[in-house]
Image (cartoon, rainbow, N blue to C red):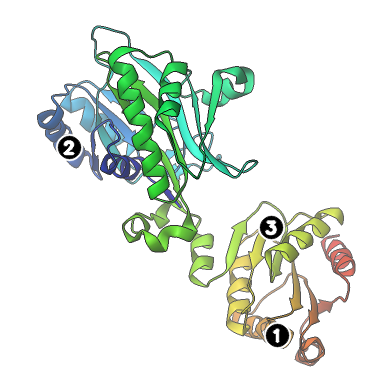
Amino acid sequence: MNIHEYQAKETLKKYGVAIQEGITADTPDQAVEAAKALTEQTGTQWWVVKAQIHAGGRGKGGGVKLAKSIDDVKEVSSQILGMQLVTPQTGPEGKKVHKVLIAQDVYYPGESEPAEFYMSVLLNRNTGRNMLMYSTEGGMDIEEVAEKTPHLIFKEEIDPKVGLQGFQARKVAFNLGLSGKAFKEMVKFVMALYKAYEETDSALFEINPVLKTSDDKIIAVDAKVNLDDNALYRHKDLANMRDINEEDPTEVEAGEANLNYVKLDGNVGCMVNGAGLAMATMDMIKLSGGEPANFLDVGGTANAQTVEAGFRIILKDPNVKAILINVFGGIVRCDRVAQGVVDAYKNIGNIDIPIIVRLQGTNAEEAAKLIQESGLKVTSAILLKDAAAKVKEALA
């Protein structure tokens, strides 16, 4: 589960990570009040207005702007609030901005030049260990840095038996070229960041940039946090941070129906029980010349209501030109799935796209009889390759 920047910073602060302070606002007038309050709190005379959406690259899309006066705060927040912000991570449709973060200006003049670093904590799936990934080249173009100058990306793996050690945090600070106060501040920052990552059961913490200020403080200017959905039952406070406005409405609906659904860009809707069978089904569709429009796993406890809900979700995609139902009845009963197909036809009505059904396993014969006697325009298949071939015929 993704959370907003301001929520990520609030979480980091609880664990002792120094952050760029900020106050959220839903309207331009609230933004003005937030700016005034922030000045009283931090003494800042300039403010950064930052769009709060679940996507990176906001600055490139015009979602992060500097305001040098209270009037600027109101004008800039008016421009950003309600805009359809398009970034490299949102796709061409963009995301609507419902909230802004009014943040303090941390790029003030001082004894030394500010410096931006990149830092993230994540799981290295090759080794099964958490790792710190960091670079001296922080900022908006870290992807380009990783592609063109990979030698500037450092990695530090953490032994799960002992956790992050002090010498490793000092190594990070050394590789970033820090010394004196900044070195000590970075060591504290790294230790606190890893503690926050581990104790929140997160999948990713990404801080870009980590800023060394002109007076050698180390702070998180931005924060992207992805929480492990499977661990949210242990963190009710974090689960409450979910913003469904930032999620695909169809995926939200599928979650409420206890369906595992991911929207794709193809033209063949898939309804399958089991993730492995779903992946094999999508492979067969591609091999037969089609493109899967979704990943939809109805699970091992599918019933008629679950199948009908799956139908409704698949049919909301206007790109779907055919539906392939592929169920192997182990725990789930094929006749229940077949009843769901029949009920969906009757309750939804006007289903004018081809439906190919392959039901094998428990009560498969009863399922076939149900569909045959229903009078529905459903094509049956026994083998998966036959089902894929019939999908190809339906799309021709």
Task: Find disc 3 in the rendering and name its residue.
Answer: 293
x, y percent for residue 163: 45, 41
Q: 267 above or below 110?
A: below
Of 357 and 8, nearer the camera is 8
Q: Amino acid at mark 2?
A: Ala
| Sequence-first tag of 1 and 2 | 2
Of 352 and 73, nearer the camera is 73
Separation (CA) of disc 3 from disc 2? 44 Å
Separation (CA) of disc 1 from disc 3? 25 Å
Task: Find disc 2 in the rendering and name its residue.
Answer: 34
Residue 174 placement, left or right of 27: right
Q: Amino acid at mark 1?
A: Arg
Give the SS element for disc 1: loop
Q: 46 above or below 267?
A: above
Task: Find disc 1 in the rendering and name its residue.
Answer: 333
Residue 62 placement, left or right of 47: right
Give the SS element for disc 3: loop
